[in-house]
Image: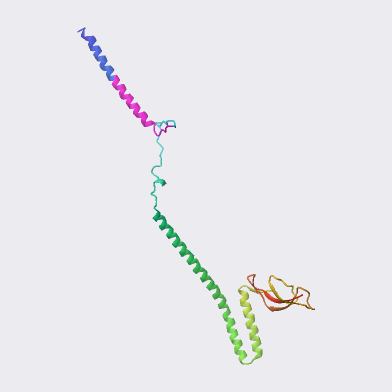
Amino acid sequence: MASCEPWAATSELRQVLEEALASYDTAEASDADEDTAIVRDVEPDEPARIVDPDRPVEPTGSDEPDPSAQPARSAPDYLDQLLRLKAEFENYRKRVQRDSEALVLRAGEGVLESLLPVLDNMARTLEAAERHEEGQLIKGVELVSGQLRAVLEGHGLDEVPAAPGLPFDPTVHEAVVAQDSDDYVEGEIVAVLEAGYLLHGRLLRPARVIVAR
């Protein structure tokens, strides 16, 4: 019995050592796997980033759509969009043109409508002239002339100031003739041949005058 005890002890010690070595190898392999999981995304030229296993993982926003992941559109898609934009712009241009033409027509309609009473009075004046009533004819012409002037002034028409004795203004007057005069000094208007008019302050037609020299 005594001779067998050392062998038994040696065998038991060997078994314990083998189990310890096996346990150590298992633990080392487990640690190596854990280190591999902790150290990740390491570039060759960058230091390793160690992830703390106790630190909560921050959201990476992977649920949001990645713009770069959107499918690329093909050339026919871009061409179709371009043709649609061109058609929309053409329709807009035509609509603006129609609106502008309608506005011009409505503006002319208002002027013509305001001139209708003038035409009525002109017809009455002509009827009076056929009856040779000179007094009524003169009054009728004066009435029509004043009414027509009032209508045109209501639409922004003003007569250019021009009368004998006024200085000649080349911006609103047109000198047809320059003649000597004993009554007016050089540069003054001698006579008005044709009246001039302004429309909303802009020269529509210059007054044609004779100027003293």
Location of the N terminus by quadrant is top left
Residue shown at 55%/73% (left/top)?
A: 107
Would residue 191 be found to the left or right of residue 81 on screen? right
Residue shown at 44%/59% (left/top)?
A: 85
Question: What x and y, as percent, mark residue 25?
Answer: 31, 23
Q: Main secondary structure of the magenta part?
A: helix
Question: What x and y, as percent, mark residue 127?
Answer: 59, 89
Q: Quadrant of residue 164?
A: bottom right
**In the image as oriented, which residue stretches furthest toward the left?**
1
Q: Looking at the picture, tell me which residue is in the foreground, 90 or 20.
A: 90
Residue shown at 60%/84% (left/top)?
A: 122
Where 163 sits versus 133, above or below?
Answer: above
Q: Looking at the picture, tell me which residue is in the foreground, 57 or 190.
A: 190
Question: What x and y, as percent, mark residue 33?
Answer: 34, 29
Where 31 sits versus 118, above or below?
Answer: above
Residue shown at 66%/87% (left/top)?
A: 138
Magenta stretch in the rendered image: 20-44
Where 66 sits versus 6, above or below?
Answer: below
